[in-house]
Amino acid sequence: MAILSILGKVVTDIIKAAANQSAGGQPSPRVTSNMRTRPLTERSVNAEETIAALEIGELVLIIDVRSPREYAAGHVKESVNIPFAELASRAPAEAKKAESVVTVSTDDALSARACETLLKMGIDTNWLQGGIDAWNEELK
């Protein structure tokens, strides 16, 4: 039930932010503001939430944690490739440029593990549930 409440809050925030932005204002409150205090088990976001945040202009860093070869075979257009083994060395610099960070892979377990790694480094992060497949399905 808590997830439905969170999703309801996200949808409400998106509608308010879109209305505010269309009236010439800045998106407020930020779409992901309610995601910041969730435990790892509740830090999954869906493709719809992430796309909505991008559409209203939120600076979302999408980190694809797969290998360069897997990334080259197909990826989220807006993502950067930082393989899981390189997260600790490369993610902090990239994350400074973003309002929110979302990890993605073809494997939810790897995305969640990457999210957990970044959280332990002090980087507020969520992971994309359903991965690349969910993203592509949302864009259809």
Image (cartoon, rainbow, N blue to C red):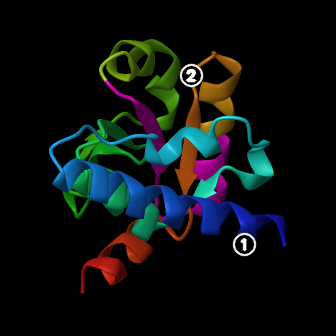
For the C terminus, give its image quadrant.
Answer: bottom left
| Residue 58 tag number | none
- Quick one: which residue is furthest to the right in this view? 1
Position of residue 117 relative to residue 97, above or below, is below
> Tag 1's secondary structure?
helix
Which residue is drawn at the image coordinates 40% and 40% (left, top)? 28
Tell me the crowding category of disc 1: few under 14, some 14 to 19, or many 20 or more residues within 10 angstroms, Cα based. Answer: few
The residue located at (42%, 67%) in the rendering is: 47
Q: Which corner quadrant of the image does residue 25 belong to?
A: top left
Please provide percent x and percent y for residue 22. Answer: 17, 55
Residue positioned most to the front: 23
Q: Nearer the viewer, residue 54 or 89?
A: 54
Q: Is residue 11 left or right of residue 53?
A: right
Residue at disc 2, secondary structure: loop
| Circle nearer the viewer, 1 or 2 | 1
Q: Residue at x 42, y 22 (%)?
A: 91
**Which amino acid type corresponds to the residue marked 1 in the rendered image?**
Leu
Is 136 on the left-hand or right-hand side of 89?
left
The quadrant in which the N terminus is found is: bottom right
Q: Is residue 21 above or below residue 99?
A: below
Q: Which residue is mark 2?
A: 123
Queried whether the magenta region covers residue 115, the answer comes back as no
Q: Which residue is mark 1?
A: 4
Q: Nearer the viewer, residue 51 or 128?
A: 51
Gap in angstroms between the C-alphas marked 1 and 2:
25 Å
Q: Which residues are magenta?
A: 98-114
Q: Is residue 131 left or right of residue 38?
A: left
Query: Is any part of residue 71 visible from this angle?
Result: no
Q: Is residue 105 magenta?
A: yes
Q: Is residue 118 in view from this perspective?
A: yes
The percent position of residue 133, horizontal first and vertical second, equals 40, 76
Say which amino acid is labelled 2. Ile
